[in-house]
Image (spheres, coloured by chain):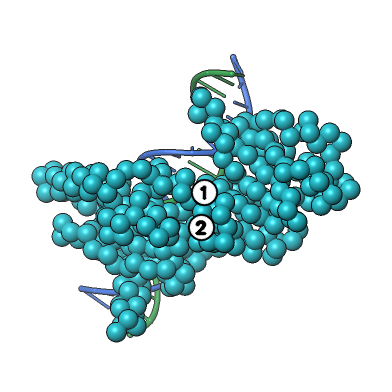
Chain colours: A cyan, B green, C blue
Amino acid sequence: MQEVILKLGGEGETLSLIGTRGTDGLRKYHIQTSSEALSELLSESDRLPSSKQQRQIKVSSWKKACDLLEQYPSWYKLHPIDIHPDFASKIHKLFSTKNDSSIHHNKIKDISRPDNTSNTDTKLHVNTQLNSISIDKIKELYEQYYALIKLEIEEFGVKATEVRHLIGRIGEFYCALKVGGALASRANQHGFDVISKHGKTISVKATAQVNGFVAISASTANLADELMLIQYTAGKLNIVYYGPMEPALDSARHYPEKMKFELDIGSARKLESYKSKARL
DNA sequence: TAGGAAAATTGCCTGAGGGC
DNA sequence: GCCCTCAGGCAATTTTCCTA
């Protein structure tokens, strides 16, 4: 199965880094261009002596894939059309190594947000992230997880915070049921956990903490349109905050050096109450 | 090329310190 | 005492690199 890892373009021509999963599950990378005319868009030094042959080369590591891309020294000057969400942070880093960081930052921000509805490729890509599990199946899983968590806490005396992996997962089911959406294609999908029926990507943070905060990775935060913070207290799940990601990030502490945000549960609660008041 | 070790990433929790 | 800020640590998973 082929996946577009990075698609760059300009004036109708494209340069793509393609990933292909073999039967062994391993991903291999190669370069694909829409036409030979692309070389006209690149500087003289970018042109490869045998670009056709070059594009046939398949490599198995990300580092080597980057080397393939570097065969086009001005690749980063092209406009990003599509970025695979799982590779957003790596691509961001790759752009960061280039001199003109302001350009790359804005480009990445523009394209890596799945709500960029003007881009058909991105929409298609989000669709491929959807998990085909039906709502009924999610409901069934939710009930099973809920029973398991109750069993752990009430029968075995385990702290709710100790079953965080179960709470994190049930939070995703809860969110999917609340918004009538679908789960992301796999567990630990980077950046978001649920895709709403309107195509919005939602990052779900479920915690059993009473106070404290939830961490949001700065490298993947821009992949989610919305945030749903769920708290498990007294055997129940409650939505602390559900809304756009941006105001949540504005309310969170930012640690640029650690590439992460920390959103206090109290701040999220305040944000939700402001939102509710604004609706009145 | 395969297997294993090391490093990186992500999500989450705990606790110290300070202000109210 | 409670809340907030901040630092640090743990566990699981993924990726990269090295070696045989």
Task: Confirm whether circles 2 and 1 share one chain.
Answer: yes
Image coordinates of residue A208 in percent, x first then y, are 26, 57
Which amino acid type is shown beneath numbered disc 1? Answer: His
The residue identified by callout 1 is A125
Q: The disc numbered 1 marks a residue on which chain?
A: A
Which residue is under mark 2? A114
Mark 2 closeness class: few <14, some 14–19, many ≥20 residues within 10 Å: many
In the picture, measured across the screen, residue A127 lies left or right of residue A167, that is: right
Q: Contact (CB < 8 A) between labels 2 and 1?
A: yes
Residue A62, compared with residue A226, is above or below; it is: above
Percent x, y of residue A227:
39, 63
Q: Can residue A216 be seen here?
A: no
The percent coordinates of residue A233 (x first, y second) are 20, 60
What residue is at 51 percent from the left and 54 percent from the top? A123
Looking at the picture, how far across and down is residue A72, in whole percent?
78, 45
Local SS, label 2: loop
